[in-house]
């Protein structure tokens, strides 16, 4: 099972139409991602990394092609099915953290669980476990503005993990962090794959970040280059 | 955390804005309720049947100008007229109270039943009133207010005439639209003021509703070009004429109300749009986390509703308690005797608040629906 593919991408294209001009963000991409690996997506700005990540994570739709995650073709799900699917299967980590400023660390992490049927106690258990995993068990009542950038990103990772998704997607998660915080965040993502068996797809510019991955692929003008 | 506390935290994230918008809703709804109540009070028809057949005759110059007593037989001779009684404002102060709390009129006790048939009293009290020239009858509300009963004595010092009169209460009536007045013998008034031969107004009972227009015209004509020209009108018109240009007032009140509601909708809708636009990116994140469009709509609607309803409870509720439990006649110096916030008006306020909550959430909901997760994530904070 460990070697099975969690993501299968076939002939995936994404074309943006801007008036008369077509911008091809992804051009006939085919790709397999193994369960439990950390795949880093590299490439110059504008090469289509974010677009590919968004389609795999089910927040964007391709123009053509197929994208199966755990044998579900996410391109065929309707809006509401997709929302449920994301809630149960995908954890998101963004470059700019994107925590809700009026919620404490604890509440931010709890947010995705409000969509589940878990009771208050079970939620508390899962939130605390996730916060401890990222080393912030003692910061649960802090608001985002009372945390450092590195801590905010760790809260965001806890939020991504709390629903126990099989897939974690991270778009330049260290892009806004100093090198020390970046190291911490990367080690956490690494341990997710190594000890929890999660599959992590991470977009990065930084070769040092790419070194944390188990495999790296390069995009150039919407095409894979290696 | 619950969905409810999440919505509350969002609504209160900008406390000053939340407070200001709640206050603007509150003030507007307070104003709206006030206008609606005022409109209702001004246009409320006298409910008594008697009023339909009564004509009030007053000086054409102003209500304050007296009419000569010799007009009475002339009016009595007009066909269709059944009875004519003087009705003169005494303007007495009771117990040195500041301001008058009930009105007193001198009239002809024999015509009490023919003209003011709706005032109900036991038979013996009618008789006692007619017999004793120094007696008076008192409306039930005033009697209750001052704990007065039949047989008590009451002294009133006029603020208009140099006279202080003592009365024995012969009866306590009820059943009129405003059971507060004190009525007494015009003869007593004439004696006390030195037989001026003047009355304040004439109150005329007309035989039938069909006779009304002809009788009022005839009375006006009877004194045209005399030294005391009169204006005769139905009791209802007379009551309403206290507010000048009533038709315009009604229109004015209605248009102000419309403007208030319209402005309120604009203000609330723009507040909500602003509040949601600031959170576009967060809403996109919520979508990414698995929140569906309809859940986001519910958040927006709940926030918008919360704003409108809180404002409405403060504004309309405040008006309700102020007007229904406060002393409105004191607050308005007697312009309004009652100022009742009726269930219907409360209903209108609730309806406006509900509509407001819904309307204000439409624009932000549409823009949230139109924005994809990806576009939402691209918006800058
Ligand atoms: N909404 C859009 N409309 C038009 N073009 C877009 C849009 N989003 C992305 N693109 C284009 O698609 C290409 C790939 O973008 P993106 O996936 O964000 O690149 P990367 O993440 O590698 O920097 C770029 O050329 C970009 O300009
Ligand atoms: Mg990108």
Image: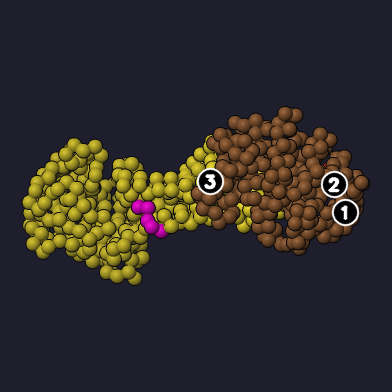
Chain colours: A brown, B yellow
Res A65 quadrant in image: bottom right
Q: Is residue A166 found left or right of A62 in the rendered image?
A: left
Chain that bears disc 3:
A
B94 relative to B201, above or below:
above
Question: Is the CB–ligand 1 distance for label 2 below 8 Å?
Answer: yes
Q: Are marks 1 and 2 on the same chain?
A: yes
Q: Alpha-carbon distance for marks 2 and 3?
A: 38 Å
Coordinates of residue A108 in the picture (x, y in percent)? 60, 43
Q: CA distance from mark 1 to mark 3?
A: 41 Å
Discs 1/2, front: 1
Residue B178 vs residue A157: left or right? left
Name the mark on residue A124.
3
Taking the spot 57% from the left edge, 34% from the top edge, the residue there is A139
Q: Residue at x 54, y 54 (%)?
A: A118
Q: Give residue B282's quadrant in the image.
A: top right
Which residues make up the magenta segment?
B340-344
How would you classify the magenta stretch by its main secondary structure?
loop
List the residue tagged with mark 1.
Answer: A29
Among the two numbered marks 2 and 3 on one chain, the one whose residue lies closer to the N terminus: 2
């Amino acid at each position: 099972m460990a070697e099975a593919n969690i993501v299968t991408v076939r002939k995936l294209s994404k074309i943006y139409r801007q008036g008369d001009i077509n911008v091809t963000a992804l051009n006939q991409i085919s790709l397999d991602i193994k369960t439990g690996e950390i795949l880093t997506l590299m490439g110059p700005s504008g090469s289509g990394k974010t677009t590919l990540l968004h389609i795999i994570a089910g927040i964007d739709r391709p123009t053509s092609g197929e994208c199966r995650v755990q044998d579900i073709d996410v391109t065929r799900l309707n809006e509401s099915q997709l929302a449920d699917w994301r809630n149960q299967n995908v954890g998101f980590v963004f470059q700019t953290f994107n925590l809700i400023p009026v919620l404490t660390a604890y509440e931010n992490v709890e947010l995705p669980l409000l969509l589940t049927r878990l009771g208050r106690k079970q939620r508390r258990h899962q939130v605390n476990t996730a916060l401890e995993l990222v080393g912030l068990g003692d910061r649960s009542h802090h608001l985002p503005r009372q945390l450092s950038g590195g801590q905010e990103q760790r809260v965001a990772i806890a939020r991504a993990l709390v629903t126990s998704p099989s897939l974690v997607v991270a778009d330049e998660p260290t892009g806004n962090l100093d090198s020390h915080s970046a190291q911490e965040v990367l080690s956490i993502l690494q341990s997710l794959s190594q000890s929890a068996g999660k599959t992590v797809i991470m977009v990065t510019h930084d070769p040092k970040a790419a070194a944390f991955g188990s495999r790296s692929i390069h995009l150039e003008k919407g095409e894979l280059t290696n | 955390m619950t969905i409810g506390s999440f919505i509350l935290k969002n609504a209160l994230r900008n406390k000053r804005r939340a407070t200001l918008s709640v206050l603007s809703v509150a003030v507007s709804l307070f104003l709206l309720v006030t206008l609606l109540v005022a409109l209702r009070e001004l246009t409320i028809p006298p409910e008594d049947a008697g009023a339909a057949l009564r004509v009030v005759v007053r000086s054409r110059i102003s209500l304050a100008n007296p009419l000569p007593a010799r007009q009475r037989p002339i009016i009595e001779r007009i066909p269709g007229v059944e009875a004519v009684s003087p009705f003169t404002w005494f303007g007495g102060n009771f117990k040195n109270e500041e301001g008058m709390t009930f009105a007193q009129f001198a009239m002809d006790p024999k015509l009490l039943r023919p003209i003011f048939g709706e005032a109900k009293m036991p038979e013996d009290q009618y008789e006692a009133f007619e017999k004793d020239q120094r007696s008076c009858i008192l409306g039930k509300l005033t009697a209750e207010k001052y704990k007065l009963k039949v047989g008590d004595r009451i002294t009133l010092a006029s603020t208009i005439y140099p006279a202080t009169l003592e009365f024995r209460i012969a009866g306590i009536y009820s059943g009129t639209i405003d059971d507060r007045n004190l009525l007494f013998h015009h003869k007593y008034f004439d004696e006390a003021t030195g037989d001026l031969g003047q009355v304040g107004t004439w109150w005329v009972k007309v035989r039938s509703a069909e006779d009304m227009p002809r009788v009022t015209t005839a009375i006006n004509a009877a004194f045209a070009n005399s030294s005391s020209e009169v204006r005769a009108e139905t009791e209802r018109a007379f009551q309403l004429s206290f507010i000048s240009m009533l038709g315009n007032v009604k229109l004015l009140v209605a248009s102000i109300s419309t403007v208030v509601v319209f402005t309120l909708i604009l203000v609330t809708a723009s507040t909500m749009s602003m509040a949601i636009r600031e959170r576009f990116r967060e809403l996109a994140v919520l979508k990414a986390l698995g929140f569906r469009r309809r859940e986001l709509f519910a958040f927006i609607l709940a926030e918008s509703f919360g704003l409108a309803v809180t404002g409405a409870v403060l504004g309309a509720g405040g008006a309700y308690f102020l007007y229904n439990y406060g002393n409105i006649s004191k607050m308005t110096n007697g312009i309004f005797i009652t100022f009742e916030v009726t269930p219907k008006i409360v209903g209108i306020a609730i309806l406006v608040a509900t509509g407001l909550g819904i309307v204000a959430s439409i624009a932000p909901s549409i823009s949230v629906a139109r924005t994809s997760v990806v576009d939402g994530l691209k918006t800058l904070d």
